[in-house]
Image: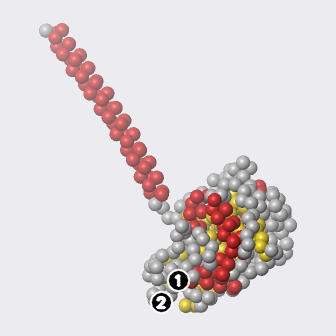
């Protein structure tokens, strides 16, 4: 009898032990599953977080062409002076930034590129290729329009996006030259080295009114870092873009450039830029003893609303073809935002 009871207890203990083991395994599986779900939730939340602003230089030269500093020195200067990314754009030369180990910092990005230095007669027709995958040789044409079109398409074929540089430097690239240009392109409306002024804005306005897919940029066209001159001509830190993107990667930066989610500046920084189908709202990060004039524009430099202060909002009447903003500080610093097409209730999107 005792042996039977002992045998029953042993069986009961064995069953209990198996049950406890099974329960423990189930708990481990459930805990693991919860961890996976938590990771997925955190990743999902992170992807839905606020977009971040990144400061970038779209036009930089090095010793690979006619700059005075190596690609590493150019990257180091910009990283040490508050930039998040640069594009190396040497004349007709492609710099393999990864082969040189230039992307070794998580907080700083070097994007490959090139300044395709084409010509029509004596007139320069320079086009930056941003995030290209190989060198683009300058192509000739029978007109300025043909030179532009061939080289913009060549940049696209190389995997990049095109930026038409300093349109009034050695001649005049006009809206007539750009009107037939197919595909998306950026337009350098403020080049701190060789080409600035209201005529650049007028060119952007005329193209926008014509329905062209184009956004305005600002850049240094930097050549001199080791020999920064007193007037800072050709030196870095004078003009840049602020790009709003999901993350600091070449693909995300390019996507935001294509979607017009950036502004061009020579020193004015925005704390807010909010564009809806009802209003255009912005605010400036104020500097001490500095005043700001904010203008909302549509048409050739036509001012729709003007104010002095650090923030303003423009509510569409519906009669404007588009609205963009310009901010001028009492120190002479500028900021240009991108056009919003009021009648179509959208920004352009890259095609």
Residue 348 visible in the displayed image: yes
Give the image quarter of residue 214: bottom right
Foreground residue, 128 or 48?
A: 128
**Residue 112: where, in percent of width, then height?**
69, 57
Number of numbered tags placed on the structure image:
2
- Asked whether, in this view, residue 72 is left or right of residue 294, the answer is right
- Front-most of 75 and 117? 117
Residue 142 against residue 15 in the figure, above or below: below
> The residue tagged with tag 1: helix, strand or loop?
loop
> What residue is at 17 percent from the left and 13 percent from the top?
5
* Spot occupied by residue 65 in the image (x, y as percentages of width and height): 81, 61
Residue 125 in which image quadrant? bottom right
| Apparent side of residue 306 relative to residue 78 in the rendered image (left or right) | left
SS under mark 2: loop
Label 1 packing within 10 angstroms: few (<14), some (14-19), many (20+): many
For label 2, the crowd category at 10 Å Cα-Cα, with few meaning under 14, some 14 to 19 and many 20 or more, is few
User: What residue is shown with label 1?
Assistant: 322
| Residue drawn at (75%, 67%) of the image | 140
Q: CA distance from mark 1 to mark 2?
A: 9 Å
Coordinates of residue 33 in the picture (x, y in percent): 37, 42
Q: Which mark is residue 319?
A: 2
Tell me, yes or no, whether the two marked residues, 1 and 2, touch with CB atoms within 8 Å. no
């Amino acid at each position: 009898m005792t042996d039977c009871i002992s045998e029953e207890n042993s069986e009961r203990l064995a069953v209990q032990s198996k049950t406890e083991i099974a329960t423990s395994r189930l708990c481990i599986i459930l805990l693991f599953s919860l961890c996976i779900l938590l990771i997925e939730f955190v990743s999902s939340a992170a992807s839905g977080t606020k977009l971040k602003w990144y400061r970038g230089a779209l036009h930089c030269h090095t010793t690979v062409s006619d700059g005075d500093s190596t690609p590493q020195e150019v990257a180091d200067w910009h990283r040490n002076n508050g930039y998040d990314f640069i594009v190396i754009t040497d004349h007709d030369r492609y710099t393999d930034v990864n082969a040189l180990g230039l992307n070794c910092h998580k907080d700083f990005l070097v994007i490959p590129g090139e300044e395709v230095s084409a010509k029509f007669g004596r007139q320069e027709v320079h086009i930056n290729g941003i995030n290209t995958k190989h060198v683009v040789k300058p192509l000739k044409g029978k007109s300025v329009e043909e030179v532009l079109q061939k080289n913009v398409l060549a940049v696209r074929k190389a995997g990049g996006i095109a930026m038409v540089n300093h349109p009034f430097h050695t001649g005049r690239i006009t809206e007539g030259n750009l009107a037939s240009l197919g595909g998306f392109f950026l337009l350098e409306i403020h080049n701190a080295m060789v080409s600035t002024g209201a005529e650049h804005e007028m060119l952007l306005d005329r193209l926008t009114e014509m329905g062209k897919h184009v956004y305005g940029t600002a850049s240094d066209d930097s050549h001199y870092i080791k020999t920064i001159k007193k007037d800072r001509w050709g030196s870095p830190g004078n003009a840049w873009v602020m790009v709003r993107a999901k993350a600091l990667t070449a693909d995300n930066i390019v996507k935001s450039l294509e979607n017009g989610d950036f502004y061009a500046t020579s020193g004015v920084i925005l704390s807010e830029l909010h564009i809806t189908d009802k209003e255009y709202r912005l605010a400036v990060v104020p500097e001490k003893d500095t005043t700001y004039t904010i203008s909302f524009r549509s048409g050739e430099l036509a001012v729709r609303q003007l104010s002095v202060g650090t923030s303003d909002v423009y509510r569409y009447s519906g009669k404007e073809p588009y609205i963009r903003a310009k901010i001028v500080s009492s120190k002479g610093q500028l900021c240009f935002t991108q056009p919003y097409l009021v009648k179509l209730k959208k920004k352009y999107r890259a095609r």
